[in-house]
């Protein structure tokens, strides 16, 4: 090997080393550039303020006209009309009633997404507010009216910043988050099946859930698990009826049910590692015909929540051991159906770490707090199985009010002042994510060239 060639190789190696060292610094500078752009943050604030009255109107319209899963026809129409008027590429009828809008930036680049759910719950609203639900027995008791409004507001603001975007932002308006009757398909699972994560492919997805335990202005985040898995089960016990005064002639399904209920709790307290959270709840029980007849049949329905896939796999078998053991000892029959639902919701730690500064800048560092994982569930978790996701909790409790009505309560009444807060947080997160993804794409391209 000639010395000139050796020298050439050496300088090439040095150059590569130098480029590798400079790359993170360059990416860091780029982030800071976006986050510290005063004009940009002022423009976002101005746009939010401009659209605020319209957004409050939209939220109240949605609240007054709630629609159950896979029936979000008017909600979807409103969303699609708004996105079309903003010049987005709009797809309707995705996963029955879902709407997907694509905002293309002036410069081509990667795609990041925001997801909002649109469905309401079969609950009779008991709030006495001028914009209470007009539909008997249907209510936005989980705040999805706010989720939809915040995503629409984010679309309005970001459409005015299109010239700054290098890449695209996909707005996913999802139906049927709250679950559906067994025979129906829908929600996040069907959206994924119908290709919502492709064309163009989505690199990261953001979502929020309103949270009445946190005050307006605050957001809660968790790196890793934020919410639990949610599975359902149905247990049927078949005994033998007899006169209530002659128990020796029957098999009492109610006594067996009592034994099963108590023993199922020992799965949590005796079988599982106490540091691993898990819940087994029986929420519905039906059995017996009369006070003076031994019950022939009991049907129980319930739910299982965990933050650990291994435990989630183990629980059905442990449950069946108990059910079969108790029923067999008394000569009764049983059936046990375990219906797998959504997996635990896992916020990708790298994404959370990369995005936290943007969230803190949007809301103020002291307003962004770490929260413990919650044992409620969200089908947003299904997106997280395919793409890095970040869901955070948005405070909706009125400052000064000690306790707000919880989610799914007929008195749930989130403070609307959380709407501009949510929009600002989403704008910062999406802009920052797009910037970071674009920077990553550039370095990937230069990797290929090297
Ligand atoms: Ni919800």
Image (cartoon, grey):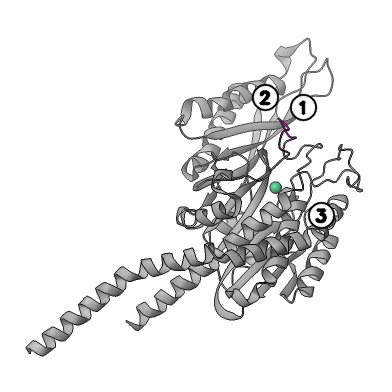
* Residue 318 picture location, percent across and down: 52, 34
Spatial CA distance of label 1 from label 3 is 47 Å
Point 55% across, 40% down: residue: 371
Q: Nearer the viewer, residue 132 or 48?
A: 48
Q: Image quadrant for the N terminus? A: bottom left
Q: Main secondary structure of the magenta part?
A: loop
| Looking at the image, residue 106 lies above or below residue 371 | below
Of the pair 60 and 218, the residue shown nearer to us: 218
Magenta region includes residue 194 = no
Q: Residues within 10 Å of mark 1 (few under 14, many from 20)?
A: some
Q: Which residue is mark 3?
A: 56
Task: Point out the tag, 2 or 3, that comes first from the N-terminus.
Answer: 3
* Label 1: which secondary element: strand
Q: What secondary structure is found at the residue carrying circle 2? A: helix
Q: Can residue 179 be spotted in the picture?
A: no
Span shown in magenta: 399-405
- Please tell me whether mark 1 or mark 3 is closer to you in this view: 3
- Dots 2, 1 in contact, CB < 8 A: yes
Q: Where is residue 349 shown, x and y percent of the image?
A: 46, 52
Mark 2–mark 3 Cα distance, whole angstroms, equals 49 Å
Q: How many labels sit on residues?
A: 3
**With 396 as the anchor, is 11 left or right in this view?**
left
In three-dimensional space, the C-alpha distance between marks 2 and 1, rounded to whole angstroms, equals: 9 Å
Q: Which residue is mark 1?
A: 287
Q: Residues within 10 Å of mark 2 (few under 14, many from 20)?
A: many
Near-viewer residue (27 or 150): 27
């Amino acid at each position: 090997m000639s010395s000139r060639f050796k020298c050439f190789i050496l300088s090439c190696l040095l150059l590569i080393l130098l480029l590798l060292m400079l790359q993170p610094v360059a990416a860091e500078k780029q982030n800071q550039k976006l986050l510290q752009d005063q004009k940009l943050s002022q423009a976002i604030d101005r746009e939010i303020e401009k659209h605020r009255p319209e957004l409050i109107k939209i939220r109240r319209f949605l609240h007054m006209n709630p629609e159950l899963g896979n029936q979000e026809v008017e909600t979807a129409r409103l969303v699609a009309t708004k996105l079309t008027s903003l010049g987005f590429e709009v797809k309707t009828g995705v996963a029955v009633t879902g709407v997907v809008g694509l905002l293309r930036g002036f410069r081509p680049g990667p795609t990041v997404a925001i997801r909002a759910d649109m469905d309401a719950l079969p609950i009779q609203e008991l709030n006495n507010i001028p914009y209470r639900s007009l539909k008997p027995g249907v209510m936005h008791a989980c705040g999805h009216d706010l989720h939809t409004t915040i995503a629409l507001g984010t679309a309005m603001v970001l459409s005015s910043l299109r010239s700054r975007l290098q890449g695209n932002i996909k707005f996913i308006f999802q139906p049927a988050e709250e679950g559906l009757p067994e025979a129906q398909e829908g929600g996040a699972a069907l959206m994924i099946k119908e290709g919502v994560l492709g064309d163009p492919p989505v690199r990261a997805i953001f979502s929020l859930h309103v949270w009445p335990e946190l005050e307006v202005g605050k957001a809660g985040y968790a790196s890793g698990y934020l919410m639990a898995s949610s599975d359902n089960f149905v247990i049927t016990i078949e005994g033998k009826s007899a006169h209530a005064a002659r128990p020796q002639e029957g098999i009492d399904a109610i006594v067996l049910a009592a034994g099963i209920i108590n023993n199922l709790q020992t799965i949590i307290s005796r079988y599982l590692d106490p540091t691993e959270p898990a819940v087994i709840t029986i929420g519905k029980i039906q059995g017996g015909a009369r006070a003076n007849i031994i019950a022939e049949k009991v049907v129980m329905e319930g739910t299982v929540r965990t933050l650990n896939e291994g435990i989630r796999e183990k629980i059905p078998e442990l449950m069946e051991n108990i059910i079969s053991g108790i029923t067999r000892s008394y000569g009764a029959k049983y059936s046990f159906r375990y219906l797998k639902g959504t997996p635990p919701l896992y916020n990708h730690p790298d994404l959370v770490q990369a995005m936290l500064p943007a969230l803190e800048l949007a809301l103020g560092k002291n307003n962004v707090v770490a929260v413990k994982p919650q044992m409620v569930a969200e089908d947003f978790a299904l997106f997280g199985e395919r793409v890095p996701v970040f869901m955070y909790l948005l405070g909706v409790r009125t400052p000064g009010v000690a306790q707000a009505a919880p989610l799914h309560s007929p008195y749930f009444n989130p403070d609307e002042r959380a709407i501009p807060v949510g929009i600002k947080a989403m704008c910062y997160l999406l802009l920052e994510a797009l910037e970071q993804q674009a920077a990553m794409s550039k370095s990937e391209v230069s990797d290929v060239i090297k």
